[in-house]
Image (spheres, grey):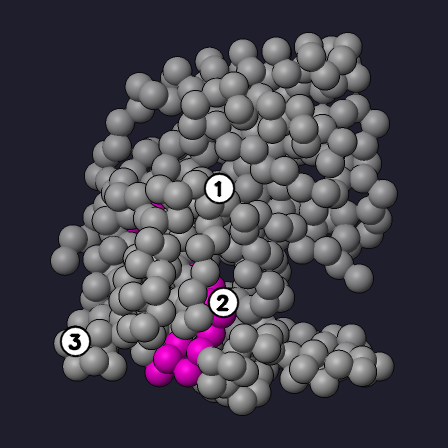
Amino acid sequence: MADTFMGFLRENGTYGVRNHIAIIPSVFCSAKVAERIAQNVPNALCFRHPVGCSQVGEDLEVTAKTLIGIGKNPNYAGVVVVGLGCERFSPHELAEGIAPTGKMLETVVIQDVGDSFKAIEIGSRMARKMQQAASLEKRIEAPLAALMIGTNCGGSDMTSGLVANPALGIASDMLVAKGGSSILTELTELIGTEHILARRAVSEDVAKDIVNAITAMEERLKNQTRHSSNTARKHLISTGNYEGGLSSVVEKSLGGMKKSGATAKFVEVFKSGGAPTKKGLLLMDGPGHDGEVTTGQAAAGAQIVCFPTGRGTPSGFPGVPVIKITGNPRTFEKMKENIDINSGAVLTGEKTLQEAGEEIYAEILAVASGKMCKAEVLGFDEQFCITRMP
């Protein structure tokens, strides 16, 4: 298989697999203006969110780092920051965080320019100019060392841990072996596997980081569910997971960890909202909410997310392709318009697990080089969701 993909080279040496213009409000108050700007410009995407003010401490810090990380993601050729002017997370701080990438960057502040009509007009002109410049950019050959994928699973059933997750793990190992990077996360769904994952750490320090991160997440969940009268919540997995054949969070964890493969070594643990400093297999310290997972991975620089789902889901992310994979052949038949890869062919005897993994790997390279996944074609972008801290 190819050792390269076709991407868009950025000023800072990273490569995008898409070439969108991101319109990012620094605060919820400017979200509608940002949305109107995006509607006026083809290929522009709005990152609407409900935060950016009345936050303090770690909660505000995670919001700031996440929005900056989204702006830095190489899939966006340019960014227009839209601020109100009196928010706690300053639009200028957001822009300054993105600026080191060297990408096209502008800021419009509603209170400074006069009113929302003027802000929409000015922001639209900024984004249109960026889009014209971006339209001239061409894909060039890029090394696989420049490619980072996120792995995420949602709506799991018994086939997820048996087929889809292990197949994705094979693809992850293949990418890391070629110098690329792969992110495992959803620590709420890795509880009970920390000792197994730690054995695959590149050093004792990384092993300790893995154990400490998952143990801390388990303690946080114990505190959150201590006074809950809902026993389903105490089991920490959704009712859909139960109906799909999973018995507990530990059983889901044993299947979920297989997304990380079997041969690659974990080289680093980093916090959701942050970015890794190393290439290879990574563990992101974050929760299991699908939207928060994908958002954290995109903010870390992942250009593609691979998403196994046994039960099926149509959701996607703005500007970051989300490849849907299922290990359930019946789910694939029901949701052909939403799911990209049927790894359930392993269960029907049509493919081996190795072949299923190679199919996912080939799809990653195809999507990286421009092939649209189904969530993109359908315009699904629900997964942008910033983690809130208690």
Q: Within 10 angstroms of label 1, few (less than 14), some, or many (20 or more) residues?
A: many
Q: Which residues are magenta?
A: 144-162
- Residue 166 visible at all: no
Residue beneath disc 3: 351
- Residue 301: x and y, percent? 47, 48
Residue beneath disc 2: 154
Q: Is residue 177 left or right of residue 322?
A: left
- Residue 72: x and y, percent? 52, 38
What residue type is disc 3 on? Lys
Label 2, label 3: how far apart the Cα atoms are: 23 Å
Q: Earlier in the sequence, mark 1 or mark 2?
A: 2
Q: Is residue 337 left or right of residue 295?
A: left
- The quarter holding residue 151 reads bottom left
**Nearest to the observer: residue 229 or residue 34:** 229
Q: At x 52% / y 78%, what residue is drawn?
A: 241
Q: Earlier in the sequence, mark 1 or mark 3?
A: 1
Q: Within 10 angstroms of label 3, few (less than 14), some, or many (20 or more) residues?
A: some
Q: At x 21% / y 64%, what residue is drawn?
A: 359
Q: Is residue 57 left or right of residue 40?
A: right
> Most extreme residue toward the front, as rendered?
334
Q: Within 10 angstroms of label 2, few (less than 14), some, or many (20 or more) residues?
A: many
- Residue 99: x and y, percent? 56, 29
Is disc 1 placed on a helix, strand or loop?
loop
Residue beneath disc 1: 318
What residue type is disc 2 on? Gly
User: Does residue 238 sit above or below 179 in this rendering?
Assistant: below
Examine the structure image and report whether residue 150 is included in the region drawn in magenta. yes
Label 1, label 2: how far apart the Cα atoms are: 18 Å
